[in-house]
Image (tube, rainbow, N blue to C red):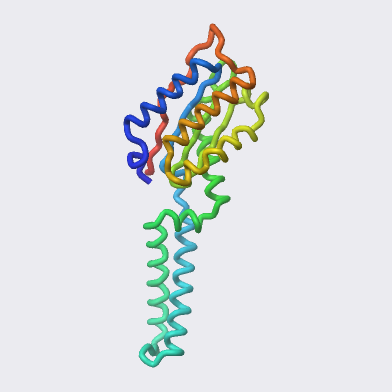
Amino acid sequence: MDINKYFSANDLETIEAEVKSVEKEISGEIVPVILENSGRYTIAIYRAAIIGALMGFIITILADRYTDWFTIYDPLIYFAITVLFGIIGAIKVISFPFLRRMLAGKNLLTESVQKKAEEFFLREEVFKTIQRTGILICISLFEKKIIILADKGISEKVDQELWNKIVEEISDDMKSKNYLNGILKAIRKCKDILLENGFSITPDDKDELSNKVRVQREK
């Protein structure tokens, strides 16, 4: 997944401007993160290779048994065809992201994005605010998932279920690849939740974390 296909330089500036605007009303600090992916999911490639090899083996047996034009006497040919189909299966998964997502499985995708979000929470020191009011909004493009993590000062008053509800509300944007609208909507909804729970900006409030969008490209 190429971030440049979904977020232009202007889009990133729009997100940064939205964060800056929202933080003029709340005492929280919002940190947006965009990832091309949260894992390589080699398990999906292995699974595709196994499925492809199995299909190749079954097709070869059926063709050999039930057709007159396809007859095999050498076991090595069975082996070669099986391996070939396995390679084709692996290539297909590498070439088509939706197949890799499907074979990786929903649970692994979610766990991978959650882990990456937690890594960025620590790496970007979202916890490093005076009142512990940092919020990380992480979008992972390959998985089409968004994770919202709030620091201790907020999570003591706001249940994680509210953040999960935001994720559910913008899931359509993720599925339709309308990522910009999704992340802007998430930022605004975070603002609404914070204001509803008493996290309005105070006279001594400072901008403690950068509004810049953190981007990680596939290695």
User: Residue 48: x percent and y percent?
Assistant: 46, 64
Looking at the image, is 61 positioned above or below residue 50? below
* Towards the viewer: 128 or 107: 107
How many labels, in total?
Answer: 0
Q: In which quarter of the image is the C terminus?
A: top left
* Towards the viewer: 216 or 30: 30
User: Residue 35: x percent and y percent?
Assistant: 43, 39
* Towards the viewer: 41 or 147: 147
Q: In this view, does 8 lie to the left or right of 36?
A: left
Looking at the image, is 42 positioned above or below residue 54? above
Q: Is residue 81 left or right of residue 151?
A: left
- The structure residue drawn at horizontal position 39% and vertical position 82%, both measured from the top left corner, is 76
Looking at the image, is 171 positioned above or below residue 190? below
Q: Which residue is at the far top?
A: 203
- The structure residue drawn at horizontal position 65% and vertical position 35%, both measured from the top left corner, is 161
Q: Where is residue 129, by image quadrant?
A: top right
Q: Is residue 121 left or right of residue 92?
A: right
Q: Where is residue 3, by image quadrant?
A: top left
